[in-house]
Structure formats: structure tokens, C-alpha cells
Amino acid sequence: MAREKIEKKERMKIPRQPMPAQEPMDRIKNFNEVALGFTEELALAEADRCLECKKPKCVDGCPVGIDIPGFIVAIQQADFEGALAIIKKDNTLPAICGRVCPQEDQCEIVCVTGKKAEPVAIGRLERYVADWEMAQEGEVKMPELPPASGFKVAVVGSGPAGLACAADLALRGHKVTIYEALHKPGGVLVYGIPEFRLPKKIVQEEIGNLEKLGVEIRCNFVIGKTASVEELFSEYGFDAVFLGTGAGLPYFMGIPGENYIGVLSANEFLTRVNLMKAFAFPDFDTPVRLGDNVAVVGSGNVAMDCLRTAKRLGAKNVICLYRRTRDESPARLEELEHAEEEDIDFRWLASPVEIYGNEEGLVTGARVQVMELGEPDDSGRRRPVPIEGDQYDIELDQLIMGIGQGPNPLVTKSTKGLELNRWGNIVVDEETMMTSIDGVFAGGDIVTGAATVILAMGAGKKASEGIDAYLRGTAEASKTA
Amino acid sequence: MGMIVSIEEIAPAFKRYVVESPEVARKHEAGQFVIVLMGEHAERIPLTIADTDPEAGTITLVVQEVGKSTMEMGTMKAGDPIQVVGPLGKATHIENFGTCVCIGGGAGIAPMLPIARALKDAGNKVVSILGGRNEELIILRPEMIEASHEMIYTTDDGSFGKKGVVTDALKEYIEEHGKPDLVIAIGPAIMMKFVALMTKDYEIPTVVSLNTIMIDGTGMCGGCRVAVGGDSKFVCVDGPEFDAHEVDFDLMMKRQRIYLEEEEIARKRFLEQHACRATDGVEVS
């Protein structure tokens, strides 16, 4: 069914279509997805806003270079299947990326429509077509695979970097095995990002699609423990290895009282709830403690996830303590706004300096230092400086540290000859993504430090090109030798 | 996915599981542990490895039934699937120290077995002190005898060996034979605490293996953290073994009790459900 094309000047008049969402006071009582997704009508209206620029800026803004005008034009024609095929050429996880990519900082920020009006809602359209496919009867269509190359690649970690790398390698004809330490694949998509932002069913379906490409996933397998990187070559017969082990090491602040019961890392809190389903204790065996007063330190996406999860678990007062202001907050604006709608008590320019506990070792409160912004620091943001003598106490039953994660050292420390930087991240060649060890590649948070899902996917995808070139190069070399 | 090869009750509330897990069996070194998971609704439970058979591709777990998950594990049958991940944690530092006293209390005897063996193989004189409430609860005796040069037993009720606790036996040993070169203690936190206090006075290097609450076991959550020498350490990746004289046992014991209430809820619920099934069984027969 062909739709009529709309004149370009008319397109600018169509307003950006709003995302249907659960009402704040309803959604804080459940773990269902907050953003409900476009209807077909909304998707078509939104797609009509695209100007089909000859030199589209949005494609450059996308870390994986999706042909954005291409898929939006397909949506204009109501050819959702065609739209998805275009996306899948560059992105094998569209339902996930459509939900969690920071589009406002990537493709949408450079959108030409956005210069005079609001940018086209590219992420929402991506999500729409991915969800559309999942709702269709029958098998999801997968791209055709080339003949097998005969090469075997091990991908370490099944988070966004590993999944993207594995998908691209499979599409290039290589045999891929993903090794995952936890009992479910997905990495941060499963243990970190909550159900209300990224339903686990969606993650499972997209990972299932990877398996249809012939990618094998081995869970409960810890590289660095169950087998070393060296053994992946010598014992398991792989020709190349990709390390996408992420930023799994939780940071604590190093302030007094951090070992009181009720002080925990964002990773622990989110893993209990998301991966182990502690919200359904005792139907699920893993519990999570929660009182009435919960504070989360930090204001990134992980902190937002903790705040909103605590609210949904029934905490009455949920406080965000952040040492800078709302403007410097690293969270996506959408996440911040959602949290604000959900009655989170944001305390900007506030940082705990000591945690109080009782004789049983239970946390009872914290002393909060009030800050002001001083001169810009290395990150270009104004440095928070304590205001002397300006402190106050808060009562707490739980304090969650959402101040960031470092590189997980399990693989890096157990692999001889792997060059690391001073923060413990793996050093790679920026072109090929190869590490200091021949045939070992890396990408995602383990290289860059904690970043976003799509940047990790972009890195995984880039590494797949480096791995492919390496494999074909060594094959040529061994032929001529 | 691993599989249970056999289950055997070796003492009241103690079961020995042989589990198929070729990769773990191949890589395991003394001192390391695994995490097991019984199904979709299950929690991840850290369990020490008592023995391995790399050729058969199996590991042996000795588990004391204390809570819901370990009791549920006890209802499993040979052939049942079970997820196993590992071997996790650092291996015990083994060298020829001279004389090593290996103190195992209750369930702590199981992880001591591979350590005692490795110490003996490295040329140490191994003196094992095993303690339990009564004779039946001093598990793995034949295996420990084989792994040791000398055995000392203590029971709370005096039903076997010396009446008293392991620290009494340790003190007696030191007074009779002089200071050993190393003490390793694995058992209830309170036992390890008192061993540490005693050996600190005697200035004997002492290692303890800690068992704290864990989720992932790979350093990701920090739930297992303990204070060691004033620093926060993760038992799963920095341990499980630490210098006994540096561990803050009081804090660790408090942290072990975080989920006591929830553990009780889960245990009661399991027992109720289990009792129902048992009654059903009686009616059928």
C-alpha cells in the first residue's frame, strides 16, 4: 500500500509525535515498560517529518552508521519489513538500540529537521519497526549467510560489544562462540538495565536471532578462570579472540561506614532485581533488602535505574545525591525526566562524606556535604567544591553507590602480555581494535571505560572488521608460506 | 550445563554430590570454589570444591543443608541438570612451609581436603585438627587421614576425640610440639575468629578461607566484601583466602546475617511445601 508523498515544506509543520507512556503514578507500582512504543499511525506521521536530506547528517551521528533516511522512507511507504532490513544491515539489535541509545546526542542532535523544528524521533521509529517484526506471526527473517570461512572466533562477554561483534562475524561467515560468565546472556542488558526500560523478553528475542545466525553461546563460562585466553587458542582451537568484558567492577567512595549492611553497589542492587528477580522473592530465591528511605549516589543512567527501581520496590523516600548539578548530570535527559516524574527527591550539589550505622551493623543514615561548582576540571565540567561547614544528616535504610564502574580485571589480569592503560583498560590499535597480543581484539567498556550500549556495539562492530581482515590476512600468509 | 552424577548422605544434613563439570574439574586448584544454580527461580550459591576427578570430568561438592537452597539441592537426583560455574577465587598459595596445621570445623572440613592434600604433596608435615558437634559431624575422616600425617579430633559433646573446641586442641598442640609454620583454618566465622586471635598471640602466620554472601562470584557486585587490614576486599576475586590476622571477623559476621529474615521465610516456605509433598507420597503408598 503506497502512501502519498508529502511536500517538504509541509513536512516541517508536522509536530514530533509524542511517545505513549504509562502514567507516572501507575508505573511506579509495576516493572512494566514505561515507554509503550508508537502506534502505526504515530510511526507514519513521525516518518513523514523526515526531509530525506541528500547529505544526511544523522548517518554520521550514528555509531554504527545505519542508513537512517533509507529506513525512514521505507516506513513512509508503510514498508516496515523493508525498513527493518535496511537497519539490520548495520545493526542486529534494533529493538534494544531503539530503546536505550542516547539518540538525542547522536543521530537526532544533527537531524536537519531539528534545526528549525524538533528532530525526527529516529530512535522511536527504529524501535517501532523492530517491535513490529516481533509482533508478526512466524519466523523472523534473518540475513543470508555467506559460505563458511573455516575460521573460529571466541567472543568473551555477551554484552552489547560482544553481541554486535558476534553478529557481524557470523554475517562474514566465521564460526562464533560467545563465552558468558553469568547464567544468562546479555551482560548489562540483562543484569543492569531494568525491565521497565528494556524488557528482558526483547533482549532474549534479539539474542535468539543471533543464535539463528549460527552463533553459539556458552553461559557459566568465565574466561580467566574456566579457561584462559591462551587456552582459547591452544586448547579450544580459536583463530581469534574478541574481549568485550565490560565495566563490571563497582566503585565505592572510600568513605567511613561503607561496609554497613544496606550499603551496596548499583551493580549488586540491579543484579539482584534484574537478573535474579529479587522483586518476586520468595517466588524467586534471591532477596533484596529495602527500607523506606533509600539514597542513590550518582546521577548517571545507572543511578537513574537504581532510583526508579527502588521506587518500584516500594521505598517511600528515594533520594538522589549528586555532587554537581542537573546540567552536569551524565544521565540521558529522558531518564532524568522520567525519574523526576516519578517523585525522586533530587539533591544536587550534595555528596555523602560519612555513613552511619547501628550496633547490629545496619545503615541508619549519612552525613551529606553541600557542594558548589568551582573551576572546570579535566572533563570540562565545573569541579564540585565542598562548602565548608555546610553539612546535614539524612536518615537512611539503604544507600546505593551508583558512581561508576571500572574494568573487570578477571581477564586482563590473567592474560600475559596484554597491555593496559593506567586505569586498567585494554589498549587497542584504534584502526583494527587489536590488542598488544596478536589475534586478540577488544572493544566496548573494557577499552573505553563505562560508556553506552551503542558505543560498545559500534566498537564490537568495528572490531569485527579488524578480526575479519586479520583472519583473511593470516589465511593468505599461511597459503603463501 | 552440568549434571548430578551421584548423591550420598555422609552425615546428618551433609550430602556428597559428584557433579559432571569437565572444565571445572580440569582447572580446579585447592582453595577455589564454584557457584551452582538449580533453575530459573534459584539463587546462585557459592560452594567449595572438596575433590575433583579431571579424567572423569567430575567435581565433588560436600554440602551442609542449612537453608532453602541447600535443602532443595538435597532433593535432587542423579541425572538432574545443575548449572555450575568456576573454578572461582584464587587458589591457595602452596609451598613447603614446614609444618602446617589444618583446622577444619563442620562444613569447613570439605574445602580443607584439597588444601591438606596439596600441602602434603608439597612436602609439608600436615597436622589436621577437625572439629564438630559430635562424631557424626566430623566428615570426610578417611580422606583427611590420607591427606594428613597426624590427626586430632574435637567434639562438643566429647563423643569422639577430645571434648572441646578446635582452639583447645591447637593450644595443646603448640604447647607440646612448638609453633607450626602455618595454620589454615576453615569453618564457622566464630571458629576462624578465635583461631586467628590465638595464633596472633603466638605469632603464627594464619590463613582463613571466608564464605560470605555472593551473587556473581566474579567481582561484579561487591556483595561479598570484607574488611581486611582496613581495606575493602572482595572475597570472590581477592580471596576466598586471607591473612587471618587482618580480617575484621565481627563485621563479616554481621554482614553474613544481612538476609537472615529472608532466609528464614524461604526455609519455612520450602519445609511447608516439602511436608505437603511428603504427606501426598504416604497417601499414595
Image (cartoon, rainbow, N blue to C red):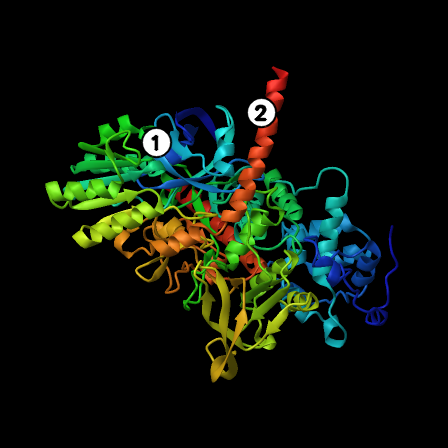
Residue B207 visible in the picture: yes
Closer to the chain start, of discs 1 and 2, is 1
- Chain containing mark 1: B
Q: Which residue is mark 2?
A: B278
Mark 1 Cα-neighbour bin, 10 Å: few <14, some 14–19, many ≥20: many
- Chain containing mark 2: B
Spatial CA distance of label 1 from label 2 is 26 Å
Residue A215 visible in the picture: no
Q: Look at 60% across and 32% down and name the residue there.
A: B273
The percent position of residue A441, horizontal first and vertical second, equals 44, 52
User: Looking at the rendered structure, which numbered label has been put on residue B137?
Assistant: 1
Please indicate whether residue B183 sits to the left or right of residue A426 in the image. left
Q: Quadrant of residue A309?
A: bottom right
Say yes or no: labels 1 and 2 on the same chain: yes
Please indicate whether residue B180 sits to the left or right of residue A309 in the image. left
Considering depth in this image, is B227 or B115 the residue closer to the camera? B227
Considering depth in this image, is A463 or B215 the residue closer to the camera? B215
The percent position of residue B31, horizontal first and vertical second, equals 31, 41
Please indicate whether residue B46 sits to the left or right of residue A88 in the image. left
Mark 2 Cα-neighbour bin, 10 Å: few <14, some 14–19, many ≥20: few
